[in-house]
Amino acid sequence: MGSNTGDLVTRVQPAHLFDHDALFRYAADNVSGFPTNPSQFTISQFGHGQSNPTFLIAVGSGSSSKRYVLRKKPPGKLLQSAHAVEREFQVLKALGEHTQVPVPKVFCLCTDPSVIGTAFYIMEFMEGRIFIDPKLPNVAPERRTAIYRAAAKALASLHSADVDTIGLDKYGRRANYCQRQIDRWFKQYLASTSEGKPVRNPKMFELVDWLRQSIPAEDSTGATSGLVHGDFRIDNLVFHPYEDRVIGILDWELSTLGNQMCDVAYSCMHYIVNVQLDKEHVSEGLETTGLPDGILSMPEFLLEYCSALGKPWPAANWKFYVAFSLFRAASIYTGVYNRWLMGNASAGERARNTGVQANELVECALGYIARENVLPAHPPSGKRDVSRPSYESLVDGTGRFVPNRKVLELRGKLIKFMETHIYPMEKEFAKLAQSDLRWTVHPEEERLKEEAKRQGLWNLFIPVDSAARARRELTAIENKQSFDQLFGEGLTNLEYGYLCEIMGRSVWAPQVFNCGAPDTGNMEVILRYGNKEQIAEWLIPLLEGKIRSGFAMTEPQVASSDATNIECSIKRQGDSYVINGTKWWTSGAMDPRCRVLILMGKTDFNAPKHKQQSMILVDMRTPGIHVKRPLTVFGFDDAPHGHAEISFENVIVPATNILLGEGRGFEIAQGRLGPGRLHHCMRLIGAAERGMELMAQRALSRKTFGVFIAQHGSFVSDLAKLRVELEGTRLLVLEAADHLDKFGNKKARGILAMAKVAAPNMALKVLDTAIQVHGAAGVCSDTVLAHLWATARTLRIADGPDEVHLGTIGKLELQRASKL
């Protein structure tokens, strides 16, 4: 079993003692929310790994306690460029704020050595599991497979980070990485074995000569370059406490920009050798000793990684990358042994064997070089993994592919729920929405929401990474375990795509499952960017379905498709912000359950163009908010949900309601425009399917000129073309969801734009044809077609104008062409 992260601590080693009082004063002044008058303040040291000493801080009073992690440079004289905690802080901050790479949140960096003797930073403590032994003893085979796949996915996620857009473009030089690394680590080896230190090994010189002559050509071109972790292995990953997924990548001391294949090879070291500090010698790896049941072979692990990123099979240069990793490990272990001789190794007495192990790693590298074959020429194929579902389990009743059994089961439950509960109630919901009581909620809707919760069909939209962040933020809230059921089923965007489509078949369905817009986008914003107070006050009631929300961005007097045009002001006055402006098309604001708006306005009209905007949470009951009128969409007012025009006149809200900070509005908007906006495309696939179904039924039952409509050749041809277009659009939307999962919003923006153009236009074609087949019945409220058509047409604007998306697609196409 994995070790709990909180159990990997011991007493602080004598060589690493520092002034606790000075640390407390600094943390209280520089860490937001740090308890300032606690009854307890304890520090213990993590004993596993890390050349940079790492400590657990526990602070609080009574049963209320917070935990943080401190990471610092070792004391004493250090090798040049080693132990750069400043760089660790930089990369963690960039990844945590701008990507979905699972990393701990960092709070502050102190470069003043007068505080505790060396530079340090403080980050969040991640409650989870660490698997120190790569053989994963006492873990079920199917879970071993899942854990290894999660590790490969985490490495792919790290390597997909776009360093140019997150502020890490100057984090290192990209080309000739291996050449520089060989020179750097050989220099460090020589420094660690100079006079009075460990004896030099002549075979290290032989190894270095071979490496210098064997550097792959791809290293000099930068073709495999990007963000490199430098020490990626399974025991540097924090896994969720009970789910087999990575929630944190640790130990970024060696990170830089460079050849990412070096990371990949280093992550495979346990297949080649077994190195443990508490063992005297290096032993054989899993390739030789045999793989425990369920653990992926090295080729299978590499296939998971390469498939996730679309990278070529690395057989041609694999020998070099493994030998390089063994060389680097030998140099590191020599340095650790040197620090042990001086008495300042963070691993303490466990480091006494590292000198012998370093020389054995050199022998292993030379032995690996001498091997004729080290990796199959082609990736593995044809061998079915018993941990994967069979092909039959990956198709639904119509033969359509679904990604896994979990999605298959949820999809089946959703379809049954729609047929049993939603479709029979559509006319009743529509009847209320057209009556004098249309701005009230049908009691059956609330009953169906409870039934959806009972069946496990609640909040399915929540991505796994967002749910993990929310759980971490809720650690200070009592009975947080009772909230776990609110965080959905831990689905990826791709998995949710198969389910969201089903909900899109009815305009009334999404809110029954708490998966309706704009609530999903708003909840996602608070999940990703809200602090624990905002999560407690607004997110939890939204997740529970007790309240609803609105998103206030569009303004009547400016073209709001260019958000730099917005004029609503958010001015700071003491401990509050004062909001003035007019918004319209604030969807959801007419709902009697709407309690909170996320409003986008300008906090600084003089800042750089994309730093003027901020987002803030606004209680709908605040004085100065005036709902002027409901707006109609082609005659539909979408009651009781509604779309409101709202004026804000000197609306005063607490300063603590700001999301992420002033000037971060565009940053949040880009996060919100990913999954939340793709949900519209997913639902449009369902709307089109409903149109196809109603159209076919009508054609088979209605006669014109003596024959059924279905017997007219022109109709059959039109129906076939629509099916082709619908299936192609579905695949495009699902691929966009997959890109979101693998690469994040920024890198997926091109295919997201394609989906946003294709989905509404396809749905409009299908629904327009269905209306035509229904004749006069198609344009009235006797069927759902007119309402579905109105919704689809609106999304060509509300989901961002086609012209904006087409501009994005065209520019990216030209950029690709210019690089050829």
Image (spheres, helix red, strand yellow):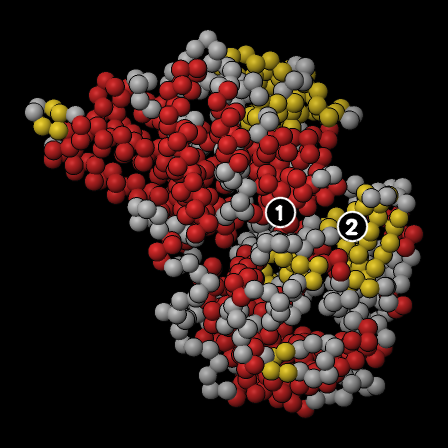
The x, y position of residue 666, in whole percent, is 58, 37
Q: Return the residue nearer the eye: 615 or 377.
A: 377
- State the residue lying farthest toward the left: 706
Q: In which quarter of the image is the N terminus?
A: bottom right
The x, y position of residue 229, in whole percent, is 62, 63
Q: In which quarter of the image is the C terminus?
A: bottom left
User: Where is 113 relative to 413, above or below?
Assistant: below
The x, y position of residue 292, in whole percent, is 55, 73
Residue 97 visible to an observer of this rendering: yes
Q: Spatial distance from mark 2 to mark 1, Cα to Cα?
A: 17 Å
The x, y position of residue 675, in whole percent, is 50, 41
Element class at badge 1: helix
Q: Dot 1, crowdedness within 10 Å: few (<14), some or many (≥20)?
A: some
- State the residue lying farthest toward the bottom: 202
The three-letter code of the residue at mark 2 reads Arg
Element class at badge 2: strand
Residue that label 2 marks: 67
Residue in the image at 41% along x and 71% along y: 380
Residue that label 1 marks: 468
When asked about the image quadrant of residue 111, the answer is: bottom right
Q: Return the residue nearer the eye: 626 or 91.
A: 626
Residue in the image at 20% along x and 40% along y: 720
Q: Return the residue nearer the eye: 781 or 715.
A: 781
Residue in the image at 27% along x and 21% along y: 778
The three-letter code of the residue at mark 1 reads Ala
When asked about the image quadrant of residue 329, the answer is: bottom right
Left or right of 319 on screen, residue 716:
left
Residue in the image at 70% along x and 89% along y: 201
